[in-house]
Amino acid sequence: MDNIHNNGTFAELKEIKYLNMGHEHHNHNHTAAISSLNKAFIIGIAINALYVIIESIAGFAYGSMGLLSDAGHNLGDIASLILALIAFKLAKVHANNTYTYGYKKSTILVSLANAVILLVAVGIIIAESIEKIFHPQAIEGNVIAWVAGAGVLINAFTALLFMKDKEKDLNIKGAYLHMAMDALVSVGVVVSGIIIHYTSWYIIDPIIGLVVASVIVVSTWNLLHDSLRLSLDGVPAGINLKQIENIICSDKDVKNCHHLHIWAISTTENALTVHVIPNSMDNMESIKERLKHHLAEAGINHTTLEFEPAESSCNKHCD
């Protein structure tokens, strides 16, 4: 008997060691990914800050609305990158007695703030561009083209820093989209500079400013919509409430479910609470393990299941 017990203990220890090794490997990969993202944000902030300074000086020196509006947009992107970096730092802070989820929700608030910052920038760009349309000014087209050309390279490089992880987090996706759009906008400014240099059609400059504003609105709308939705504890994009209900109720030992709620803890983590009516209260643990596994595959990381017998009179108004 002792031998059997010892063998069993040895097997259990091997399994625990294997699981711990897997857990450590996962943590190592996760830490490496976070470190890589931190580096990407820092590099993106640094090179874009330098470019904004250069673009602003050139814009003021040569009176280019295209350059100034693009610099204003890039300044908003720098603020967005800084806020996103702060949110990532806060998301790693451990939970406490006051904030039982930690500060993970800050990632959602930051994505909402970023959208608002960009919309404010849009308003300023539109007002200045309209003023320039009615009062066009002579500007140096070749200077605009060269400065904006540098912007194409800088914004494209920054976008590449976030391209790999853009589908993993709303803030990363926002950073990627902003930088990719900035690269396209800078291409437009380059074209306007070339046109102005060869034709002296100075009105092209404020028109490009309005095009910039339109691009910002288009690229920001989904970010604003998704951020506002998550801020109000709406069902996260990509998760269908009916499909989740079907996952739960299709289990062979589940009779029905109700009071299903799904919301976002952060831009990468989702939570769920639901009342489950099993065929038998004797199978709760096995049902729980299966449901948590299937829900995790559906993108829900934190699951709270309350089991009720079929004869229970649950209050239908407790939502």
Image: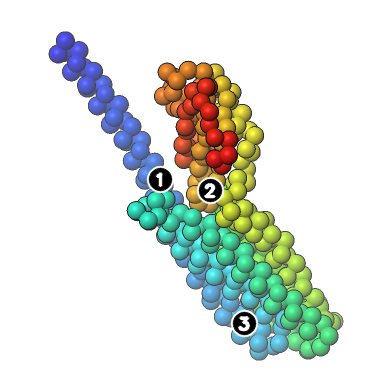
Residue occupying the point 66% across, 84% down: 59
Counting from the top left corner in percent of width and height, residue 198 is at: 82, 81
- Residue type at numbered disc 3: Ser
- Residue bearing the label numbered 1: 29
- Residue bearing the label numbered 3: 56
Disc number placed over residue 268 in the picture, else none: none
Q: Label 2 neighbourhood size at 10 Å, few (<14), some (14-19), many (20+)?
A: many
What is the spatial separation of the Cα atoms under label 1 and label 2, in whole angstroms?
23 Å
- Residue type at numbered disc 2: Ala
Nearer the viewer's eye, disc 1 or disc 2? 2
Q: Secondary structure at mark 2?
A: strand
Counting from the top left corner in percent of width and height, residue 113 is at: 57, 65
Q: Label 1 neighbourhood size at 10 Å, few (<14), some (14-19), many (20+)?
A: few
**Quadrant housing residue 4:** top left
Residue occupying the point 48% across, 59% down: 106
Which numbered disc, 1 or 3, marks the residue that appears first in the sequence?
A: 1
What is the spatial separation of the Cα atoms under label 1 and label 3, in whole angstroms?
40 Å
- Residue bearing the label numbered 2: 264
Counting from the top left corner in percent of width and height, residue 9 is at: 22, 21
Q: Secondary structure at mark 3?
A: helix
- Residue type at numbered disc 1: Asn
Which numbered disc, 3 or 2, marks the residue that appears first in the sequence?
A: 3
Q: Which quadrant, please, contains the N terminus?
A: top left
Q: Which quadrant, please, contains the C terminus?
A: top right
Report the front residue among 258 and 226: 258
